Image (tube, helix red, strand yellow):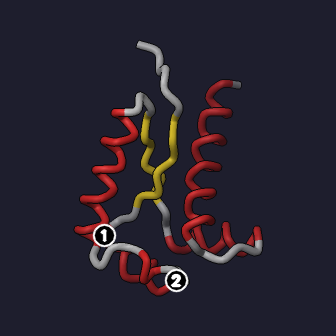
Amino acid sequence: MPVTGTRIGVVWYRREDWDELMTLFPDADALDDSYDDWLANARNLMDEIAELGHIGEPVYLFPAEFRHWCAMRNRPMNAEARSEFASEFVRRKYRAQDE
């Protein structure tokens, strides 16, 4: 069955990276208090995206890769940059598959 909804990149964290990432993000205080809380909320977000007819695609955010990505763009490692990182990843992934 062909995909009909928009693919939406959703920033995804690994448990083993959580503590390190929370030290990198200038807005970490706005995130969930624990990995488990974040994961429950992220799963709910994926369900909401699906209910709207779209496809949520987890985009893993690895500390070193994200640090480099932000440095190359002179961006703070905040929520806006994290969302842009996920969106850019999904665009590149599917553009390459369409070519």
Q: Residues within 10 Å of mark 2 (few under 14, many from 20)?
A: some
- Compared to residue 25, the image places residue 81 above or below, namely above
C-alpha span from label 2 to label 1: 15 Å
Q: Residue furthest top?
A: 1
Q: List x then y, in percent, for residue 31.
A: 40, 74
Please name the amino acid that badge 2 sits on: Leu
**For residue 26, what is the image quadrant?**
bottom right
Please name the residue that numbered disc 2 is placed on.
Answer: 24
Relative horizontal placement of residue 96, taking residue 51 as reference (left or right): right
Please name the amino acid that badge 1 sits on: Arg
Q: Residue furthest bottom?
A: 23
- The number of numbered discs placed on residues in the rendered structure image is 2
Q: Secondary structure at mark 1?
A: helix
**For residue 95, what is the image quadrant?**
top right
Relative horizontal placement of residue 97, taking residue 54 as reference (left or right): right
Q: List x then y, in percent, for residue 21.
A: 45, 78
Q: Earlier in the sequence, mark 2 or mark 1?
A: 1
- Compared to residue 66, the image places residue 95 above or below, namely above
- Compared to residue 1, the image places residue 68 above or below, namely below
Give the residue displayed 76% in from the left and 70% down from the top.
72
Relative horizontal placement of residue 80, taking residue 63 as reference (left or right): right
Question: Could you say which is closer to the camera, residue 41 or residue 13?
Answer: 41
Quadrant of the drawing holding the C terminus: top right
Q: List x then y, in percent, for residue 75.
A: 71, 73
Give the residue displayed 40% in from the left and 33% down from the top.
52
Give the residue displayed 56% in from the left and 58% down from the top.
83
Please name the residue that numbered disc 1 is placed on.
Answer: 15
Quadrant of the drawing holding the N terminus: top left
Q: Residues within 10 Å of mark 1 (few under 14, many from 20)?
A: few
Give the residue displayed 76% in from the left and 74% down from the top.
74
Q: Give the foreground label among 2 and 1.
A: 2
